[in-house]
Amino acid sequence: MINKNKIEFKKSQKRLYLFLIGIAICMSLGILASCFQQPTKPLLVGTNEWPGFAPLYLAEQLGYYQNSAVKIVDYPSSTEISRAIRSSNLQAGGISMDETLLLAETFPEIRVILLMDLSNGADVILGKPELKTLSDIKGKKVGVENTALGGYILSRALDQVGLSVEDITVVSLGYSEHEAAFKQGEIDAIVTFEPVRSKLMATGAKVLFDSRKIPGEVVDVLVVRQEIIETQPKDLEQLIRGWFMALDYLKKQPESAAQIMAERGRITPNELLASLELLNFFTPEENQKLLSQGNRNLVEASEKLSQVMREKKLLNSDVKFSSFLDARFVTQLSKSNL
């Protein structure tokens, strides 16, 4: 019995000795915490080929998210990004203001933590060369993506020429189908955006309507699930910090930035730079003022948007965009001078 106890005691001593050696090795390498640290939960951020989201990709490629949980994930459309946020497959994503209203109507657990860009001609309705004005689409086949933004732009455009959806034949097309459907003559006009806009215009397509006709109404924002603000605030802060660092890099080194970002959209760097000229990116100062509602412009634009969407049956209830705004991260970054 005594010998057996001695053996067990020696085994325990050996296990303790090996354990202490393991700790010593970890400490000597300066990684004691990582030896016991749980895997970091990823912060998945959804985007699509819209050029206004390209700075997120640029930030990732430049290594601005290297020491964080941030990972940029491409999706085919903003509708799928909204769906993934709702189902927890994404923690955050870039979507348009109208898509935000649509998502918030049935999923109020989202917050807008960053204003990204304002479309100033990048969203368009293109027609065949023989269509001279927007009124000429009456009786024609018009392709449009089955999203809130596609329906909204088409509705706003038709209003301006006294037409309704009953005056045209609506053809539902996914964004990836826009270019081929137009080139193959399956439709007479298409509601689309960059980079397809530039590609089709190069083949002779004519701009019948663009977002400059509805200033301030097509805004892209970064939305996040509310619980992520509490559980991963440092990652969100780094996400936004990297965004503004990428915009600064784009401003100072446009050719280099375009070379990197163009790989994502399968277009040339010059085409990308041309498409970015049709966008206005919000500055940190503008973000702080608008998200904190220190300036009423954004709230008034969103109220107008919500009203139009309800009138066009794109929205079923009165959703207050202002109730989802959260300025804490842009405010923190402004205080730290980014």
Image (cartoon, rainbow, N blue to C red):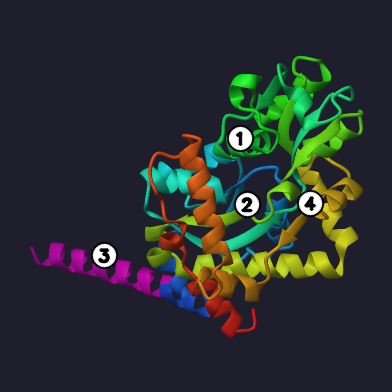
Q: CA distance from mark 2 to mark 4?
A: 26 Å
Callout in the foreground (3, 4): 4
State yes or no: residue 5 in magenta: yes
Mark 1 lies on residue: 155
Q: In the rendered structure, which disc, 2 or 1, sits on the residue that comes first in sequence?
A: 1
Q: In the rendered structure, which disc, 4 or 1, sits on the residue that comes first in sequence?
A: 1
Q: CA distance from mark 4 to mark 1?
A: 32 Å
Q: In the rendered structure, which disc, 3 or 4, sits on the residue that comes first in sequence?
A: 3
Residue at the spot 83% in from the left edge and 59% down from the top edge: 257
Mark 2 lies on residue: 217
> What's the residue type where badge 3 is placed?
Lys
Callout in the foreground (4, 1): 1
Mark 3 lies on residue: 11
* Residue 296 horizontal/vertical position (percent): 54, 69
Taking the image as drawn, is residue 103 in sight? yes
> What's the residue type where badge 1 is placed?
Ser
- Callout 2: helix, strand or loop? loop
Residue at the spot 82% in from the left edge and 31% down from the top edge: 133
- Magenta part of the protein: which range? 1-22
Taking the image as drawn, is residue 37 in sight? no
